[in-house]
Image (spheres, grey):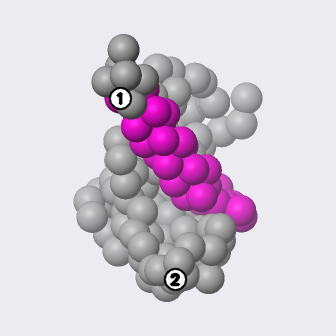
Amino acid sequence: MQRFLHSSIVLALFALAVSARAVSERAMYAPLPKYPAEAKAGHLTGSGAFAFHIQADGRVERVETLKSIGHPVLDSAAIAAFREWRFHPHDTSWTLRVPIRYVDGPVRIDSSMSRRPASGWGMLITVFSRGK
């Protein structure tokens, strides 16, 4: 019984630490990337991933392309928006990876938008070319 109680306390403390980290990784300011007119006109779509190198004060120091979206105009639009993001301060600098996709068409919800991100990753960002 004592071993069970000890294990439960350790597990609860671990869960608390993980959830506190998840809360602190949320952006305080996160403008959605734009879907450039040129990309809309060309019906350009694609998926990519970027790494945010975030300073301890919460500012994005730089954005690194991990996987190109496939079109320079979409990569540039994503990077421009991501540079504006601001996060809660941390004790040290850190990195967060963020997947993004550009979809040609109206807003629609799918299962990939509600999946929990893997550790060190942010939620999938989906940018639609047209509103509802």
The numbered disc on residue 96 is none
Towards the viewer: 17 or 74: 17
Q: Position of residue 62 (x, y in %)?
A: 45, 82
Check contact, mark 2 vs mark 1: CB within 8 A: no
- Residue 124 seen from this side: no
Front position among marks 2 and 1: 1
Percent position of residue 64, x then y: 35, 74
Mark 1: few/some/many CA within 10 Å (<14, 14-19, 20+): few
Query: Can residue 56 be seen at all in this image of the molecule?
Result: yes
Q: Which residue is labeled 1 in the image?
A: 7
* Residue 53 position (above or below residue 107): below
Q: Secondary structure at mark 1?
A: helix
Pick the quarter of the image with the N terminus. Answer: top left
The image position of residue 111, as x and y in percent, is: 46, 20
Q: Residue furthest left?
A: 67
Q: Residue furthest front?
A: 2
Mark 2 to mark 1: distance in Å? 35 Å
Residue drawn where x is 40% and y is 37% of the image? 10
Residue shown at 37% from the left, 54% from the top = 120
- Residue situated in front as seen by the camera: 107 or 115: 115
Amino acid type at image mark 1:
Ser
Mark 2: amino acid: Gln
Callout 2: SS: loop
**In the image, residue 27 above or below residue 20:** below
Label 2: which residue?
55
Is 77 located above or below residue 4 in the figure?
Answer: below
Magenta span: 7-33
